[in-house]
Amino acid sequence: MTYFIRHRHVAAVALVAACLLGGCSEKPSGTEKNADPQVASLQSASPKAEAAKDVNDERPLLALDATDEDLEALRKPWGKCVREQGGPGYENPRQVNATRSAKNSAILKACLSKEPETFEERQKRQNLSEFRDNQRQWYLCAQKAGYKLTAPDENGEFGLAAVGPNGDYRSAKMEACRKEAFKD
């Protein structure tokens, strides 16, 4: 009797395994012998989904050593877009950032791919840990150079607590520290 129960148990396990491995599904009635069986397949992303990119990746990059003239040249296409999207009242494209409104948000979204992005902004967006390391280097350099600074936030970003003899954020020593920290 024990022999029969053991074999029955083994047979049941084998039957379950065969069903699981074989799919254990019946053919619907009326199917033809040559009909394609329904098989699960991986769905590829649609071409539309593959074409969708981060519009930030299209933004022009403002190099670390860019001059004010370089910045103005990069801002021209963005300014033109803001004026075209905004119409009257948007002759000065920087005004689009001055107030928050649905119209300004729509203009900024439409023109984002033309708005210049600094090296630091791109690095913060693409590699936050490296950005934080560079911010820390910049902070330490500026502190050593004698700037009075606010405490860094969680990303290492800081500001001037007071403008001293070295000057403000765009002063030569501060720029030298920034360029040294972000040069890699």
Image: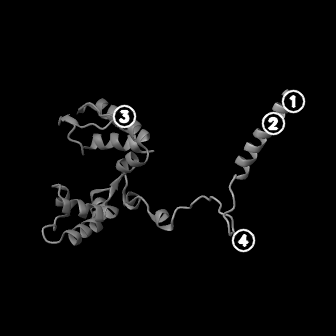
On the rendered structure, is 184 left or right of 152?
Answer: right
Looking at the image, tell me whether mark 1 or mark 4 is earlier in sequence order. Answer: 1
Decide: marks 3, 1 in contact (CB < 8 A)?
A: no
Looking at the rendered structure, which numbered label has been put on residue 32?
Answer: 4
Query: What is the secondary structure assignment of the residue under circle 2?
Result: helix
Amino acid type of the residue that numbered disc 3 sits on in the rendered structure: Arg
Q: Which residue is mark 1?
A: 3
Q: Amino acid at mark 1?
A: Tyr
Number of residue marks: 4
Category of crowding for the residue at label 2, using alpha-carbon neighbours closer than 10 angstroms: few (below 14), some (14–19), many (at least 20): few
Q: Which tag, 3 or 1, sits closer to the chain's start?
A: 1
Residue placed under numbered mark 3 in the picture: 136
Q: Amino acid at mark 4?
A: Glu
Quarter of the picture holding the C terminus: top left
Instruction: Mark 4: give few (<14), some (14-19) or many (20+) Cα within 10 Å.
Output: few
Q: Position of residue 98 (x, y in %)?
A: 16, 55
Please state which of the two labelled residues, at mark 2 or mark 4, is closer to the viewer. 2
Tell me the crowding category of disc 3: few under 14, some 14 to 19, or many 20 or more residues within 10 angstroms, Cα based. Answer: some
Q: CA distance from mark 2 to mark 4?
A: 35 Å
Q: Residue at x 65, y 60 (%)?
A: 39
> Where residue 157 sits: x, y (%)?
30, 38
Label 2 and label 3: CA atoms lie apart by 71 Å
Residue indicated by mark 2: 8
Give the CA separation, mark 1 to mark 4. 43 Å
Q: CA distance from mark 1 to mark 2?
A: 9 Å
Q: Secondary structure at mark 4?
A: loop
First in sequence, mark 3 or 4: give its number: 4
Residue 164 falls in which quadrant of the image?
top left
Q: Return the residue found at the far left.
A: 89
